[in-house]
Image (cartoon, rainbow, N blue to C red):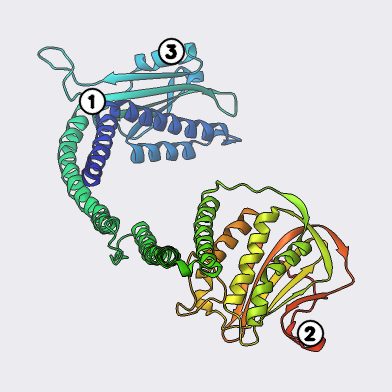
């Protein structure tokens, strides 16, 4: 059932429940409620007079003037007949209201004796209902006969005198009141139902109109129309929902762009080695003289590159799906970095790059050594790809008793602060026209992020445009062994000790900063 009809139905149901309760209390239960209120009122007036009688003793006995004033007040304000009898003087009427209210009968002598006897038998109090009007022809009670209630109580005053107070009050004819209320309730019910229908339609429109608009826009978003706008109007919850959907649409736009870039990059990276392999294979097949080790090595290198790309894609897929598990062991992080340095000998010899490793201790950590090697290798590759004119990459290891921090620094172009959050995405490039210095798949930083998150490691990047970037990560320390050397460099040129120190800008005496 649509929400609009549900709102109308709920409003009508609520109105019907209220009307049913109103009818029950104003017609069915009215007589009982009214009687209870009237009896409580009569009893309260009697108690007030008794309290005054018991607390107004003077040298001459009861203060008649005060009691008489109270009796008259009750008569005028509550339309009750009050009579006070002195039981010590043969039922002489001590005090009585000045007149008898309309539709009430006077209290006869026989009534007084009967009330006294019934009160004495009932613990001092007696309550009686009486109908005044009878149909003269049939002798039956008339439809709107007046009903009265009489309350009598025997008590002792402050001088141990025995008295009886009797109060008689008219109870408004119930049938006439109920008929009047019933006629009024019919009109009120009709008005209330009409108002409920009108109000429910208005409220349902106010509630459903923004939901319908949001639903319509959401259907467009589901059709991949990411430029759709969700209007931020209506009540608070709808505005917050529309703001969230607008944010989701913007993020989906970014994801769609990244998806297209990813497909384009993967297609390019797959096509390039395949083209090279096919081309050199055809040359070797068609030209026997071209079957040289160099051409075969090119085919092997391109096949290796293709294999690395597929492996990286599988690795990142496993990492993001949680399918890849860590194999933790205790190993030397310092020696791990030294082993990675040996892979860059050929690059150093051909392109005259400087790769410097600064450290003070041999640090043992508990982690997956294969994955951590992959992290360091990818960070160094990234630094070489964006190295500055000095062609220097600095790897720094800083440790204290709790954590070890590894920093990989280059002096290249740096990263725009607005783009820092995107550098961990697959195939994201700060400068799309940039040419890599080493072969890579474009997935390095994304793999780094996923591996470090799997280790619950802290990591990040510090960068300044035109000054370079420093990528870092921190892992818990298992143990530390002191070393006598501090700097290791791989350099194809002859670099003096002074120039190496100038290239290193990290103060090794500092402890790694901890995240707050």
Q: Residue at label 2?
A: 501
Above or below: residue 290 compared with residue 54: below
Q: Residue sitting at 53 percent across and 73 percent down?
A: 420
Q: Is residue 465 left or right of residue 2?
A: right
For marks 3 and 1, the one nearer the N-term is 3
Q: Please give the label number shown on residue 257.
A: none
Q: Position of residue 165 (x, y in %)?
A: 44, 25
Q: Quadrant of residue 174?
A: top left
Report x, y in % for residue 378: 61, 66
Residue placed under numbered mark 3 in the picture: 118
Between 47 and 222, the one lying in front of the other is 222
Q: Label 3 vs label 1: CA separation?
A: 24 Å
Q: Is residue 255 left or right of residue 51?
A: left
Whether residue 76 is visible here, answered yes or no, is yes
In this picture, is 295 found above or below 219?
below
Tell me which corner region of the image, top left, top right, bottom left or bottom right, holds residue 233. bottom left
- Please, what secondary structure does the residue beneath circle 3 have? helix
In the displayed structure, 308 sits above or below 352; it is above
Q: Quadrant of the N terminus?
A: top left
The answer to whether the residue labelled 3 contacts the one labelled 2, judged by CB atoms less than 8 Å apart, is no
| CB contact under 8 Å: marks 3 and 1 | no
Quarter of the image where one finds residue 343: bottom right
Q: Residue at x 61, y 57 (%)?
A: 451
Mark 3 vs 2, N-terminal side? 3
Where residue 146 is drawn, which disc sits there? 1
Mark 1 or 2, closer to the camera:
2
Q: Are marks 1 and 2 in contact (CB under 8 Å)?
A: no
Q: Could you tell me if residue 105 is visible in this image? A: no
- Kindly state the secondary structure of the residue where label 2 is placed: helix
361 or 13: nearer the viewer:
361
């Amino acid at each position: 059932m649509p929400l609009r009809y549900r709102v109308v139905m709920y409003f009508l149901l609520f109105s019907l429940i209220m009307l049913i309760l109103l009818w029950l209390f104003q017609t069915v239960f009215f007589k009982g409620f009214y009687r209870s209120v009237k009896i409580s009122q009569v009893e309260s007036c009697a108690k007030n007079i008794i309290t005054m009688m018991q607390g107004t003793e003077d040298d001459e006995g009861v203060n008649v003037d005060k009691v008489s004033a109270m009796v008259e007040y009750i008569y005028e304000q509550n339309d009750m007949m009050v009579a006070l009898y002195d039981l010590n003087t043969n039922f002489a009427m001590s005090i009585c209201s000045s007149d008898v209210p309309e539709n009430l009968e006077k209290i006869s002598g026989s009534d007084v004796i009967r009330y006294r006897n019934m009160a004495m038998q009932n613990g001092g109090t007696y309550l009686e209902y009486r109908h005044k009007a009878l149909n003269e022809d049939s002798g039956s009670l008339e439809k709107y006969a007046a009903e009265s209630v009489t309350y009598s109580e025997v008590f002792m005053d402050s001088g141990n005198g025995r008295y009886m107070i009797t109060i008689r009050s008219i109870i408004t004819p119930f049938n006439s009141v109920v008929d009047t209320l019933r006629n009024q309730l019919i009109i009120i019910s009709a008005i209330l139902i009409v108002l409920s229908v009108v109000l429910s339609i208005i409220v349902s429109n106010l509630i459903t109109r923004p939901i319908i608009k949001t639903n319509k826009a959401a259907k467009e978003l589901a059709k991949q129309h990411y430029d759709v706008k969700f209007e931020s109007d209506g009540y608070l919850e709808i505005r917050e929902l529309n703001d969230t959907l607008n944010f989701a649409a913007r993020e989906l736009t970014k994801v769609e762009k990244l998806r297209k870039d990813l497909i384009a990059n993967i297609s390019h990276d797959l096509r390039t080695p395949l083209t090279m392999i096919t081309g050199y294979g055809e040359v070797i097949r068609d030209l026997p003289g071209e079957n040289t080790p160099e051409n075969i090595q090119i085919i092997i290198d391109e096949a290796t590159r293709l294999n690395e790309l597929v492996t990286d894609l599988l690795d990142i897929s496993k990492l993001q799906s949680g399918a890849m598990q860590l194999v933790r062991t205790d190993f030397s992080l310092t020696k791990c970095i030294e082993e990675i340095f040996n892979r860059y000998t050929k690059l150093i010899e051909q392109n005259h790059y400087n790769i410097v490793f600064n450290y003070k201790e041999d640090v043992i950590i508990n982690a997956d050594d294969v994955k951590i090697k992959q992290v360091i290798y990818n960070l160094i590759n990234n630094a070489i790809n964006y190295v500055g004119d000095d062609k220097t990459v600095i790897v720094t290891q800083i440790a204290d008793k709790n954590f070890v921090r590894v920093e990989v620094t280059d002096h290249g172009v740096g990263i725009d602060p607005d783009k820092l959050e995107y550098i961990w995405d697959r195939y994201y490039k700060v400068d799309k026209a940039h040419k890599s210095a080493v072969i890579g798949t474009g997935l390095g930083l994304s793999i780094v992020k996923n591996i470090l998150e799997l280790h619950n490691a802290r990591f990040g990047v510090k960068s300044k445009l035109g000054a370079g970037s420093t990528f870092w990560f921190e892992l818990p320390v298992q143990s530390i062994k002191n070393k006598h050397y501090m700097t290791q460099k791989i350099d194809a040129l002859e670099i003096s000790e002074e120039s190496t120190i100038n290239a290193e800008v990290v103060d090794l005496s500092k402890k790694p900063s901890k995240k707050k």
